[in-house]
């Protein structure tokens, strides 16, 4: 504290302002922007380049998805989220079919293939493509291009630009048919240009006619889908409830579900069996209870009858007892009366004997006197 007291303090001294704060706005020099607009990537669409230059500089371009149409660079339109959802749905059912059937490979990630056509050459990158296992040219895991011709190509329209639409619906349609792509699907989230084509024997595409709203592929036997689902995009779990998709969607899940369902039905059957046994046992118990109640009623009836008979017997015994007692009493009274009468008679006879004895003595006395 003593050291702090010796530190000089300047009071009411104006702050020292650096000289550059006194500069006027007009005196501040213009600084270059931190981010230059010159760095925005510019498309080379329409540029004429050789095939060699395309493969070298444009096939794996970091900013644009370039295709090559007979020497001219073309840029694939940037997809929107709705088209992404549609492509995800379609890719998912394609993957399920291929996983179930094991008859083809699914290709994406802008892997391109070269089309040598009657009047030109082009290099295309379909959004999704399929290579059958029977195709003589296969693709290896480390390949960035496909050296053969895809068996099926799918393009997703996400741009209403007339040029983009025409490129997929007219130009590529002709190229794919001439190149030998067996089936070509155009999926448009706006529903205007959605089309499905199958290559005829004459090398021309014919439209695949939906049957009750269902498209069936010949390239992938068993692959079928509802056009409506391309826009509703139900989950795979919902699709397995539909007979259209049941043959190939989530087969392992369906098998597990079926096993679980069988187990559930078995358990339910066992439960029903147990319930029947329980009901049977309950009926037996109720029957036994009825028999017990019936026996109890019979017992109570018998007991009541026994009690009634016992009361009747006791009453009869009481009556007989009273009758006997009354008879005994009457006989006893009669006997007592008879005894009393006999006693009186005996007493009278004794008196009569005494009288006769006295008379006899008197007579004997008189006789002696007379003698």
Image: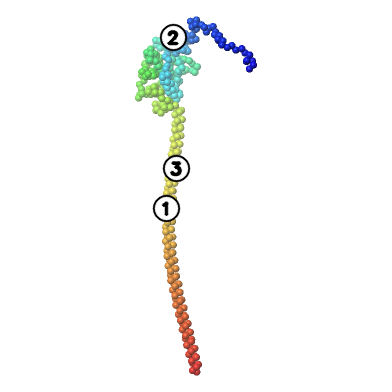
Tell me the distance, in whole angstroms, between the alpha carbons under discs 3 and 2. 82 Å
Furthest toward the right, the residue is 2
Q: Is residue 261 above or below residue 342?
A: above
The answer to whether one can see residue 92 in this image is yes
| Pointer 3 or 2: first along the chain | 2
Q: Which mark is residue 215?
A: none
Q: Is residue 344 above or below residue 196?
A: below
Q: Secondary structure at mark 2?
A: loop
- Callouts 3 and 2 close, C-beta under 8 Å: no
The residue shown at (48%, 92%) is 366
Give the number of the mark in front: 2 or 1. 1
User: Which of the 4 image quadrants contains residue 119?
Assistant: top left
Percent x, y of residue 339: 46, 76
Q: Secondary structure at mark 1?
A: helix
Tell me the distance, in whole angstroms, between the alpha carbons under discs 1 and 3. 27 Å
- Label 1: few (<14), some (14–19) or many (≥20) C-alpha neighbours in 10 Å: few
Percent x, y of residue 31: 50, 7
Give the number of the mark in front: 1 or 3. 1
The residue shown at (36%, 22%) is 210
The residue where tag 1 is placed is: 297
- Label 3: few (<14), some (14–19) or many (≥20) C-alpha neighbours in 10 Å: some
Name the image quarter holding the N terminus: top right
Q: Is residue 137 above or below residue 242?
A: above
User: Which of the 4 image quadrants contains residue 97?
Assistant: top left
> Could you say which is closer to the camera, residue 147 or residue 350?
350
């Amino acid at each position: 504290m003593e050291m702090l007291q010796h530190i000089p303090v300047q009071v009411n001294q104006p702050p020292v302002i650096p000289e550059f704060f006194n500069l006027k706005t007009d005196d501040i020099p213009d600084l270059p922007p931190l981010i230059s607009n010159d760095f925005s990537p510019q498309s080379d669409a329409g540029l004429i380049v050789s095939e060699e230059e395309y493969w070298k500089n444009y096939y794996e371009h970091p900013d644009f998805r370039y295709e090559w149409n007979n020497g001219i660079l073309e840029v694939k339109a940037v997809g929107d989220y709705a088209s992404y959802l549609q492509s995800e749905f379609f890719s998912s059912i394609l993957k399920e079919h291929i996983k179930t059937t094991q008859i083809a490979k699914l290709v994406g990630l802008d892997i391109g293939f070269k089309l040598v056509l009657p009047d030109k050459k082009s290099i295309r990158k379909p959004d999704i493509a399929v290579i059958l296992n029977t195709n003589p040219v296969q693709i290896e895991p480390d390949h960035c291009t496909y050296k053969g011709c895809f068996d099926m190509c799918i393009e997703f329209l996400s741009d209403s630009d007339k040029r983009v639409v025409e490129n997929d619906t007219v130009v590529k349609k002709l190229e794919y048919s001439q190149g030998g792509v067996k089936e070509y699907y155009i999926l448009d989230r706006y529903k205007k240009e959605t089309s499905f084509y199958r290559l005829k024997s004459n090398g021309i595409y014919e439209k695949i006619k939906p049957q009750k709203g269902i498209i069936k592929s010949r390239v992938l036997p068993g692959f079928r889908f509802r056009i409506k689902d391309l826009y509703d995009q139900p989950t795979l779990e919902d699709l397995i409830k539909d007979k259209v998709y049941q043959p190939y969607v989530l087969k392992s899940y369906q098998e597990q579900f079926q096993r679980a369902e069988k187990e559930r039905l078995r358990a339910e059957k066992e439960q029903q069996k147990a319930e029947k046994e329980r009901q049977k046992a309950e009926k037996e118990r109720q029957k036994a209870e009825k028999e017990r109640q019936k026996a109890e009623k019979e017992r109570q009836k018998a007991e009541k009858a026994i009690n009634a008979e016992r009361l009747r017997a006791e009453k009869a015994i009481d009556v007989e007892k009273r009758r006997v007692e009354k008879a005994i009493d009457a006989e006893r009274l009669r006997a007592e009366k008879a005894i009393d009468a006999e006693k009186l008679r005996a007493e009278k006879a004794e008196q009569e004997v005494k009288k006769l004895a006295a008379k006899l003595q008197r007579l004997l006395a008189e006789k002696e006197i007379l003698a």
